[in-house]
Image (tube, grey):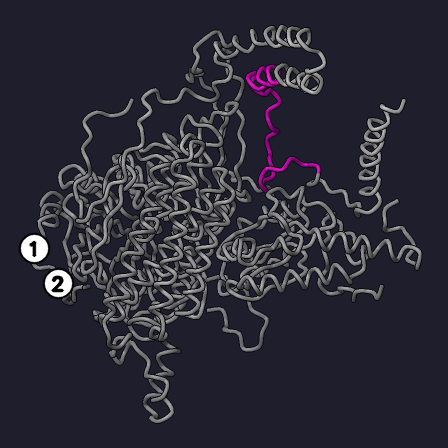
Amino acid sequence: MTTVDDAPREADHEPSDEVAAAVCARFPGSIAAESHGQVVVHVDRAALADVARFLRDEERFTTCVDITAVDHLRTAARVLPDGVTAERYEVVANFLAHARNRRVRIIAQVPAADPVVPTLTGVYPGTGFPERETYDLLGITFEGHPDPTRILMPDDWIGHPLRKDTGAARVPVTFKGSPDPR
Amino acid sequence: MGLDQVPHNFLTARLEDLVRWGRRNSVFPATFGLACCALEMMATGAAHYDLARFGMEVFRASPRQADLMIVAGRVSQKMAPVLRQVYDQMVEPKWVISMGVCASSGGMFNNYAIVQGVDQIVPVDVYVPGCPPGPETLLHGILTLHDQIRTGELMRRRAASPTGGAAIDLGAVPAPAAS
Amino acid sequence: MTTAEHDLDRLEAQTDEGAQELRTRSRSREVVLAGGGMWPEDELGDTMIINMGPQHPSTHGVLRLMMELDGEDVVRIKPVVGYLHTGMEKTAEELTYVQGTTNVSRMDYASNFANELVFSMAVERLLDVEVPPRAQWIRMMMCELSRMASHLLFQATNGMDIGAVSMMLYGWREREEVLRLFEFITGLRMNCNYIRPGGVAADLPDGWQERVLEVCDTVEAGIAEYDALLTENPIWRERTIGIGRITTEECLERSISGPILRSTGFAWDLRKAQPYLAYDQVDFDVVYTENGDVFDRYRIRLHEIRESMRIVRQCVERMPAGDYRVQDKKVTPPPRARIDESMEALIHHFKLFTEGFKVPAGETYVAVESPRGELGCYMVSDGSGKPVRMHIRGPSFYNLQAIEPMGGASLVADAVAIVSSIDPIMGEVDR
Amino acid sequence: MSDYLPILVMVGVVVAFVLLSFVASQLLAPQRPHAAKQAPYECGIVPEQEPAERFPVKFYLVAMSFIVLDVEIVFLYPFSVVFRDLGGFGLVAMAVFVLVLLVPFAYLLSVGALEWGPVRRALERAPGPVLRAPHAVLEPPTRAEEAA
């Protein structure tokens, strides 16, 4: 049964979850939150690789399940714990600890001015492909990535399609009353 | 002296019918499965809806041995040059079936990544609707192509194009001349 | 921003991958021939780069493998993907939540129900909506049936890639039965859009129990045939045992999941570890093996079909009654009959299908066990009718990274067997 | 002359078929030469670096040994048709012929020419049984020994 989770509570001062507490203790700038029953920790983007190494070595998080980014240029309402400066981009990394059978989500705010985040391929080699995809579609460069090239778009493609300011390049369809390209 | 120069009269009519009949019954498709339509294309080739009954015995992998390219699935921007290259490398005479709405017109993905209709790249003979088209729909499309081969005139329909491939400018597709 | 229109000279442009090209690098020859005898050791000529490219019968779609070959030995393999990139995540941001499942269903087109399930569960978690038990059991049954269909497709293409071409016909013979069952229940053979946020599209047609049990018996007979044909076949064992070996540590650090991870001895299955739907109320086994080679992955998928059949049979016996969609006004449109009678129902129906229902702001990550591994959906909503961001974590996208540890120092024919044992679906890789 | 007729007829049919197929394809197929048709087929990719001319010598040596052994088999065919009439003498002659060619075959085997591809892992683990876990397994297996 999918359990009914309570509404996202504001993060009280010391996080209830032990992993979040450990991360907050180890990395002072990070703030823990809880979203629909899942533990989320907002960390400073420079410390992303160190947080990942900490999770892998001390907290036995065996796998970085997914790395992606979100462009909040046109987001109407955003749920952010207080104390986190809302930037345009958010890099989101999900981790899974098989032995402890639990997940944690690390979110780092990335300013639009210089969208650079340290790479996690040193800690988890499995993040090579998703980081290339995030660079390719959203333009967030992962410094230290062994092969920082495009993965999905043709190599001579200009621009990053998933950014909110890039239109969907909808080709005007020729039937009457076709939706105008938003 | 290819068959183009053969005068079109009652002496050569039987020869053309023989050639058309031969071509119609031995069309070999090239495996050009891209996305979900590829699974339905393989299902059409498999036991239940056997394509071999119509002379399409086997899906040839290399374009050198294929007459028909079934574009099964959505064609992305990165795949367009590859599709054009494989089409150019196919031997004459060659036909193209655009299988599924994504190949025919970009389908539900009207965005930056999908070529809105494969007829921008290669001249298409038969468009098969559906997403994905069931094996029966594809078979109907293939039989329509067979009729086209059987009744259409032999050579002259395809204007020789500068790029060598039999590119049609879509405006003036001459009606098939009565043989 | 280059507009997407397609001019002919771009077509003439080289199809090479620019920065992603594989460059040969000469290296000393450390591959020792078995005999170790006086076979003439030529100094290493420059190796050859060939493309097992986008249009190739054995790459399961448009995967391109750039291989550096030294004679028959594969020195390096580099997968190049992106040939089926459809911009689905951009399209998802333009579709309402009601329309979202049609888009997502076309990602992993071998098992469509898993994608629709993960999208619907993400939306339901954001809405904090509870799906009635009958809908949960219908969803579980459909997901297990699509797992059977997907593994039958694997048996067909895996057999053909390694040389047993007759497997292609056998595999499709059984898969056709399952597809016809999907057509009977949902109306479409593939991309059914049957699992939607709030429940399922329609109730099960009457007489479905016999049809489902009939399909299970047919598939069971088919599986026994494959087992007899392949598992003891010496040629099959010679081509698959010991090929493409991978260890649990290599899998975990590359976030590889599903049958590949289970073939290395670690029986990790999300349906058991983090149960969703009603998987904790049905009993089934997680199948796993020890060696982590191509032969093990073939056997795992063969036995997983049997496990899925066990679950489907339990679903047929214990399918609860009740309504198949959540009766919450803001998610489910009113039933068709009510629309003729009351004006509000008509307005409600119209608003639901034009602007879609509003999902409160928030973000969540939901993961389910698809036939290829952990299929996750990360969704961010901002209170409007359309998601801000919908990212699907496709298992094949990560499993493709297993080619490098598996593929080193093998033959070209082994590389084909290895790619086939990873069973990537390119729609899910390129999204 | 009469017993040579079948061979002549066969040769005639072969030549006729070859000529017919060439002439027919010249006549019937539309001629549209195109650069791509001459280019090597690289799964749809336009190869910008020419394929390496120098093939590894291994191919050449295996081709040579194949030709030697294949021709030997070709000689066995006519022998098999008439070996009854030849009697003891034919048997001895063919035995000497086969033995002479056995020596190079033995050499090839000993040198490992027919062992193809990189050295297989010596420790070939036999495939274990298919195991089943009715309950959730959370601990990844810790394997003490690791295959070489």
Q: Quadrant of residue D142?
A: top left
Q: Which mark is residue A8?
A: none
- The residue sitting at 21% across, 56% down in the picture is A85
> In the image, what residue type sits under mark 1?
Ser
Asked whether residue C361 appears in the rendered view, the answer is no
Q: Quadrant of the C terminus of chain B?
A: bottom right
Residue stretch rendered in magenta on the structure: D38-66
Q: Which residue is mark 1?
A: A16
Circle 2 residues within 10 Å: few <14, some 14–19, many ≥20? some
Q: Are marks 1 and 2 on the same chain?
A: yes
Q: Secondary structure at mark 2?
A: loop
Q: Which residue is mark 2?
A: A10
> In the image, what residue type sits under mark 2?
Glu
**Horizontal and vertical percent position of residue C160:** 49, 42
Q: From the viewer's perspective, tell me whether residue B15 is left or right of residue C347.
A: right
Q: From the viewer's perspective, tell me whether residue C186 is left or right of residue B12.
A: left
Residue at mark 2: chain: A
